[in-house]
Amino acid sequence: MRALLYLPPSRQSPDIAHDRGSTLDAIEKKRQAAAAALEFVEPGCKLGIGTGSTVNELIAILDRVRSRVDVLVSSSVASSSLLEANGFQVATLSQSGDLDLYIDGADEANKRLQLIKGGGGALTREKILAGAARRFVCIVDDSKLVGMLGSFPLPIEVLPMAQDFVARQLLKLRCRPALREGFVTDNGNHILDVHGMRISNPLEMENRLNQIPGVVTVGIFAQRPADVLLVASDGGVKELRA
Ligand code: 5RP
């Protein structure tokens, strides 16, 4: 008999949250943030590309800096497919070695450039590419900027055989893990979306959750925050640095 460990989400699902504000206006902000990120691509760049709707806007205009890109690596099968459809060759991280630059979106960001990522389920490869990059530029619209991380349900990638165990540990922390139904990551794992977390100390929480056996990756990016956050709003793109 399967234990019913996961409480139903009290808020909108991450998929819906992921689409939040997808009005024309929000799409235009994503485009502006993506365009601003192109400035960081220098000649001979070993470039890492993230995943998500904001990154898709970046891929759509990446041709503008094609001549400056030496090697390209991506954080997901979805982004690789889109890059290839746009005529780019995608290398593996083993082929590229460390990266000069990684550009990716986020689900939430604070002013210390700590992030929640993983709404699209690509958090593990995203964390690896961010870790391999000398510089991490994060592109968001202003709806993603928050005072405290945790309103967006925190994605945690887990080994399938450990998902109930990990969920029980999370329940002890008084938060509400929900299995992302029918979703399998590019690595063959599952995602728990953790609702009701107030992440006042992202670094400590990332370390703590990382200790739970069966956790593959926690969607808090505090050990490796962004170096530059490009926030697009009605007034233009603002650059925040750590
Ligand atoms: C994917 C991610 C994305 O960067 C994050 O979900 C933001 O996506 P979007 O640009 O579509 O809002 O972490 O795993």
Image: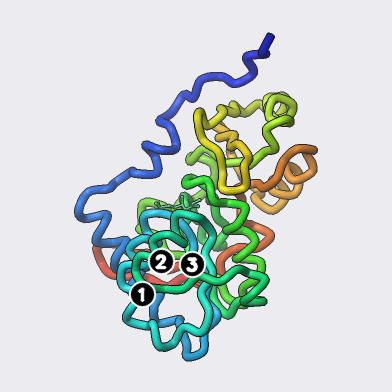
x and y percentages locating residue 9 in the rendered image: 49, 25
| Snapshot quadrant of residue 185 | top right
**Three-letter code for the amino acid on which mark 2 is drawn:** Leu
> Callout 2: helix, strand or loop?
helix
Asked if residue 130 shows in the view, the reply is yes
Measured in 3D between alpha carbons, the distance from the residue under mark 2 to the one under mark 3, in whole angstroms, is 9 Å
Residue 97: mark in rendering: none
- Mark 3 CB within 8 Å of ligand 1: no
Earlier in the chain: of badge 1 and badge 2, it is 1
Asked if residue 242 shows in the view, the reply is no
Task: Tell me the crowding category of disc 1: few under 14, some 14 to 19, or many 20 or more residues within 10 angstroms, Cα based.
Answer: some
**Three-letter code for the amino acid on which mark 1 is drawn:** Leu
Q: Is residue 163 above or below residue 46?
A: above
* Residue highlighted by disc 2: 83
**Three-letter code for the amino acid on which mark 3 is drawn:** Ile
x and y percentages locating residue 14 in the rendered image: 44, 37
Question: Residue shown at 39%/39% (left/top)?
Answer: 17
Is the residue under label 1 in contact with that under label 3 (CB below 8 Å)? Answer: yes
Is the residue under label 3 in contact with that under label 2 (CB below 8 Å)? Answer: yes
x and y percentages locating residue 168 in the rendered image: 72, 24
Residue 49: mark in rendering: 3
> Callout 1: helix, strand or loop?
helix
Question: Residue shown at 34%/69% (left/top)?
Answer: 86
Name the foreground residue: 100 vs 225: 100
Residue 62: mark in rendering: 1
Q: Is residue 206 above or below residue 30?
A: above
> Callout 3: helix, strand or loop?
strand
Earlier in the chain: of badge 2 and badge 3, it is 3
Measured in 3D between alpha carbons, the distance from the residue under mark 1 to the one under mark 2, in whole angstroms, is 9 Å
